[in-house]
Image (cartoon, rainbow, N blue to C red):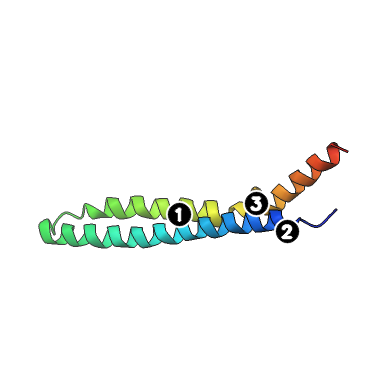
Amino acid sequence: MDPIPTEVRQREARRYVKALREFYGLVFTSFAVIAITGTVNFLTSPGRWWFAWVALGMAAAVLFSALRLFGRSRFLGAAWEARQIQRYLERGQ
């Protein structure tokens, strides 16, 4: 099997870094939203903790994003793509 071409590796690296940047942005945004809604909740209705639903939703978004970003290498990641490309190219010969 031929090594993965440099262009393909660079394209995959760019996609990964972009996704990683978006993930870190989501984590930062989640912390900010949770902090703001927690503060508003504490100041307006300290007896009812409705902001926990916001925190739960944001945590779920971060969890699914992390699974998509970090868990994809096991199933449909770069190695899988490279194998599929190689199979396709071999069929064409």
Q: Earlier in the sequence, mark 2 or mark 3?
A: 2
Judge by depth and name the residue closer to the eye, 33 or 4.
4
* Residue carrying label 3: 77
Give residue 6's mark: 2
| Kind of residue at badge 2 | Thr
Judge by depth and name the residue closer to the eye, 76 or 16.
16
| Kind of residue at badge 1 | Leu
- SS for dot 2: helix
Using residue 92 as the reference point, say whether residue 77 is left or right of it.
left
| On screen, residue 22 above or below 92 | below
Using residue 21 as the reference point, say whether residue 37 is left or right of it.
left
| On screen, residue 85 above or below 39 | above
Q: Where does the image place residue 52, in percent across and percent down from the top left?
A: 27, 54
Query: Which residue is farthest left?
Result: 44
* Residue carrying label 1: 63
Query: Which residue is farthest front?
Result: 7
Q: Where does the image place residue 48, in percent across and percent down from the top left?
A: 16, 54
Q: Earlier in the sequence, mark 3 or mark 1?
A: 1
